[in-house]
């Protein structure tokens, strides 16, 4: 009778025992995401992109840096100084295509050509070079700088896009780990209850209070639950290994999860209702927020600057140069300055048929049209994917709410079956059946909660915000 009393108390004990957490470390999704974004090599690689963008822009701005120059050309032969040509100065490019120039020439020698003959003290000059045709409104330097600025902005969107992909894959791995662990806890508890029941039934049968056939029924349950537990253990081990691939130390050393690191219990995870409401409000602005669409717009902007430069090349090349000249006296550059002392020049060239230039311009326009079509198609695809993911999340949230009640009902049936067993109106077989149904319901609820969180992750991914 004492064994029967022990068995009755066992049947009325909770099926899902609380896991011992004294020595366990809880690893939340927020902590995991922060760790991945901080230390994962791909995240660190993505962090280099804005720096590369700034470096590219800095390099393009270098085309407008002032340049000093010096040229010295001498010839000595047969103990004679044939010529010594010195030219030094400073050139300053400007944003408007104008180039300012100032310098000093001093030429000496026994055999100077007439155009190189200068006053004894040399000649100082200051002037300007102005493109009147091609290059007046835009040139290669300005095109390169504009494209570098676009690249610097695009690098931020590219970083967000890479993090979006990374955190989406990492998030799926986390929720698979979460599901595997919570299912493992259910099967551990189910095995523990089945083992205790088997021991109690065996003791009761040895005392003659129950038939030995009940030990066979209880033993089968133990074997089935050991099998389920083994499968759950291997799934948890594999899920832990998969999630570990996203965890790294700060010094680029892979991190391996400890056996005492666990995810939150499934009962503590919400259905993501408030998070989803925020995404629904952003649906109309998805086109402006998504990094992939931003990258497409930056691509179009880059192509547009290239088109402007190709159109500029249809103009003739016409450059005019003017230099004011002065022979310095006692280091006074302007002492002998006169409006009548100057040097000027004109350069003109133009292809007669412009076939190359016209072909390049047409190609640039076609590339822009192609990029615009691609942007429209990608925008439509992402909008539909966002709506689909929101719909799936809405259904998933309702499924979690619905099945939470179903699990309570299964557990209520199990409790009622135990009371009937206590009054002699049920059997150990029915207890086992009700208990297994409750276990399966709990496992299915864990799967639905996992699906819900992965759907919410999918929503964030379609909005390009999984990495935020």
Image (cartoon, helix red, strand yellow):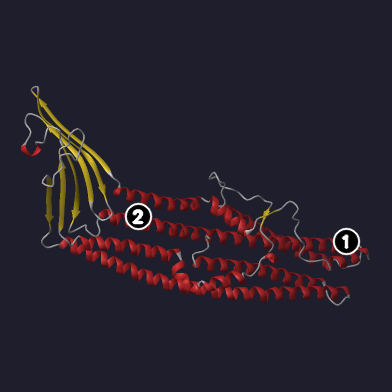
Report whether 144 appears left or right of 314: right
- Where is residue 422? Give x, y as percent: 87, 73
Instruction: Tell me the tag on residue 378.
Output: none
Question: Which residue lies at the image location 83% right of the left edge and 72% below the top edge?
Answer: 418
Report whether 98 appears left or right of 226: left
* Distance of label 2 from label 1 (alpha carbons): 82 Å
Report whether 41 appears left or right of 110: right
Q: Name the residue under label 2.
A: 148
- Where is residue 407? Give x, y as percent: 72, 73
Instruction: Please tell me in which quadrant of the rendered image residue 124 appears.
Output: top left
Viewport quadrant of the N terminus = bottom right
Q: In the depicted view, which residue is nearer to us: 206 or 156?
A: 156
- Where is residue 213? Give x, y as percent: 83, 67
- Where is residue 415? Give x, y as percent: 81, 73
Count up the numbered dots. 2
Q: In the depicted view, which residue is nearer to us: 333 or 38?
A: 333
**For the residues carrying marks 2 and 1, which lies nearer the camera in this image?**
2
Mark 2 nearby-residue class (10 Å; few <14, some 14–19, many ≥20): many
Q: Do the residues under discs 2 and 1 have CB atoms within 8 angstroms? A: no
Mark 1 nearby-residue class (10 Å; few <14, some 14–19, many ≥20): many
Question: Which residue lies at the image location 68% right of the left edge and 67% below the top edge?
Answer: 443
- Mark nearer the N terminus (2 vs 1): 2
- Secondary structure under the numbered disc 2 in the rendered image: helix
Question: Which residue lies at the image location 62% right of the left edge and 66% below the top edge?
Answer: 450
Instruction: Tell me the tag on residue 203.
Output: 1
Instruction: Please tell me in which quadrant of the rendered image residue 277 appears.
Output: bottom right
Report whether 138 appears left or right of 181: left
């Amino acid at each position: 009778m004492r064994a029967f009393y022990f068995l009755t108390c066992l049947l009325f004990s909770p099926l899902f025992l609380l896991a011992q957490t004294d020595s366990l470390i809880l690893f939340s999704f927020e902590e995991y995401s922060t760790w991945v974004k901080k230390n994962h090599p791909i995240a660190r690689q993505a962090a280099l992109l804005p720096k590369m963008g700034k470096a590219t822009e800095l390099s393009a701005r270098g085309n407008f840096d002032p340049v000093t120059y010096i040229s010295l050309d001498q010839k000595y032969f047969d103990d004679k100084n044939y010529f010594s040509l010195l030219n030094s100065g400073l050139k300053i490019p400007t944003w408007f295509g104008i180039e300012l120039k100032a310098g000093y020439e001093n030429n000496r020698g026994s055999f100077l050509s007439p155009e190189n003959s200068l006053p004894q003290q040399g000649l100082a000059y200051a002037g300007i070079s102005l493109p009147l045709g091609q290059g007046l409104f835009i040139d290669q330097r300005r095109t390169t700088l504009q494209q570098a600025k676009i690249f610097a902005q695009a690098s931020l969107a590219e970083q967000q896009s890479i993090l979006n992909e990374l955190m989406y894959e990492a998030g799926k791995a986390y929720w698979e780990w979460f599901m595997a662990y919570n299912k493992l806890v259910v099967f551990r508890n189910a095995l523990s209850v089945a083992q205790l029941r088997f021991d109690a039934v065996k003791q009761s049968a040895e005392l003659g209070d129950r038939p030995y056939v009940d030990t066979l029924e209880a033993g089968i349950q133990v074997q089935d639950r050991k099998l389920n537990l083994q499968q759950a253990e291997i799934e948890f081990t594999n899920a832990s290994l998969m999630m570990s691939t996203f965890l790294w130390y700060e010094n680029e050393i892979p991190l391996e999860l400890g056996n005492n690191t666990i995810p939150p219990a499934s009962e503590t995870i919400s259905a993501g209702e408030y998070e989803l409401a925020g995404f629904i409000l952003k649906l109309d602005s998805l086109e402006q927020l998504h990094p992939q669409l931003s990258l497409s717009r930056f691509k179009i902007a880059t192509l547009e600057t290239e088109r402007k430069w190709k159109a500029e090349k249809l103009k003739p090349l016409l450059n005019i140069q003017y230099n004011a000249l002065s022979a310095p006296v006692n280091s006074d550059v302007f002492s002998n300055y006169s409006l009548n002392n100057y040097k000027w020049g004109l350069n003109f060239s133009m292809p007669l048929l412009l076939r190359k230039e016209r072909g390049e311009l047409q190609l640039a326009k076609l590339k822009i049209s192609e990029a615009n079509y691609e942007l429209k198609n990608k925008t439509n695809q992402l909008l539909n994917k966002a709506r689909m993911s929101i719909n799936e999340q809405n259904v998933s949230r309702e499924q979690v709410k619905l099945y939470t009640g179903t699990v309570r009902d299964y557990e209520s049936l199990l409790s009622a079956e135990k009371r009937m067993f206590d009054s002699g109106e049920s059997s150990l077989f029915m207890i086992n059946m009700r208990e297994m149904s409750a276990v399966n319901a709990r496992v299915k609820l864990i799967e639905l909660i996992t699906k819900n969180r992965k759907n919410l992750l999918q929503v964030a991914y379609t909005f390009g915000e999984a990495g935020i």
